[in-house]
Image (cartoon, helix red, strand yellow):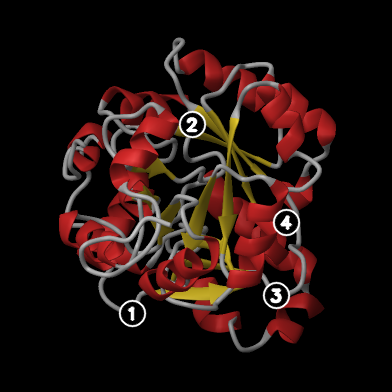
Amino acid sequence: MTVRSGGSVGSTPEQLCDLLGIQRPVLSAPMAKIAGGRLAAAVADAGGLGIVGAGYGDPRWLAAEMAETEGRRVGIGLITWAVDRVAVETALQYGPAAMWLAFGDPTPYVPVAHDAGVRVVCQVGTVPEARAAAAAGADVLVAQGTEAGGHGRPVLPAVEAVAAITRAVGDLPVVAAGGIVDRPDYDLAVAAGAAGVALGTVLYATDEAADSLAAKERIVDAGEGETVRSVIYDLLRGPEWPPGYTGRSLRSAFTDRWADRLDGLRGDLDAHRLRYQRAVECDDVSLRVVWAGEGAAAIDRVCSAAEVVQRFPKV
């Protein structure tokens, strides 16, 4: 077991970079349909591991986005509970540098990826999940904290999750996710035992992320306390997630009105879905979802992905 000078255990940033073939211990979170080929390529060019967020496994979207990477060494992320072996095998045909599996049992898919010569990154939120992923053969674990944007479960803050999970899995590299924007966040995560960091919201607010400028500026404008966990947008957009999962987004007129009134929302769901669709069509970010974590409050402008990744050290 590796013991750091500060007393924490786990793999080091140098070991993570060697394992994944990167220069900086930075992974881009596979934000579904936001983390496309341009963003993954930009992260790769800056020395990190860019991940294309293939989400529910749409093969047409994935093909178009992988073409945007122009042959760069990037990974592919999938939502485990929502895909099957066909989707995993389709993703592996692109020869990704890593397969990121999140939200579900990775056991059926880890050997499939390993047989293709691909490293597997498993996103977890609890010690039992971490032990199960390690037993399944994961090469890297991502410890997702409750402050992270997008879907997850409100369990532990990122630094606490990292500390607990590294104690449970020993030398297996653990990457911190949730609320990480800048070098001080990285330093805290590494002190807790992390071998690197995964960046989501801060990379959403970059030139290369696949969403509108209005959505990115909404992240920049967000202050403390402007995110909320709910299932509202799953009800409005679909699909509904398994019990226990919620999504952290920026507050909106929808979340302000319905967060504590889900029965009322469900009671006239067709009408609310129509209203939501109209908001999407006109890019009304006061209504449509903008997934974001608590780190949004520390983001002060839209910039390039390279600028973000280069805040973190080369090792």
Q: Secondary structure at mark 2?
A: loop
Q: Which residue is mark 2?
A: 36
Q: Which residue is mark 1?
A: 225
Mark 2 belongs to which amino acid?
Gly
State which tag comes first along the sequence, 4 or 1: 4
Residue at 29% across, 22% down: 45
Q: Nearer the viewer, mark 3 or mark 2?
A: 3
Q: CA distance from mark 1 to mark 3?
A: 22 Å
Mark 1 belongs to which amino acid?
Gly
State which tag comes first along the sequence, 3 or 2: 2
Tell me the quarter of the image containing the N terminus.
bottom left
Q: Is residue 131 above or below residue 59?
A: below
223 left or right of 112 in image: left
Q: Quadrant of residue 194?
A: bottom left
Q: CA distance from mark 4 to mark 3?
A: 12 Å
State which tag comes first along the sequence, 1 or 3: 1
Q: Residue furthest bottom?
A: 260
Q: Which residue is mark 3?
A: 244
Residue 82 placed where, x, y %?
Answer: 77, 48
Residue at 47% across, 37% down: 35
Residue at 27% across, 30% down: 23
Q: Nearer the viewer, residue 8 or 201?
A: 8
Which numbered dot is residue 104? 4
Q: Is residue 24 above or below residue 224?
A: above
Dot 1, how many residues are within 10 Å of its Cα: few (below 14), some (14-19), or many (20+)?
few
Residue 86 placed where, x, y %?
Answer: 83, 29
Dot 4, how many residues are within 10 Å of its Cα: few (below 14), some (14-19), or many (20+)?
some
Q: CA distance from mark 4 to mark 2?
A: 22 Å
Q: Nearer the viewer, mark 4 or mark 1?
A: 4
Residue at 42% across, 60% down: 292
Q: Is residue 224 above or below residue 306?
A: below
Mark 3 belongs to which amino acid?
Gly
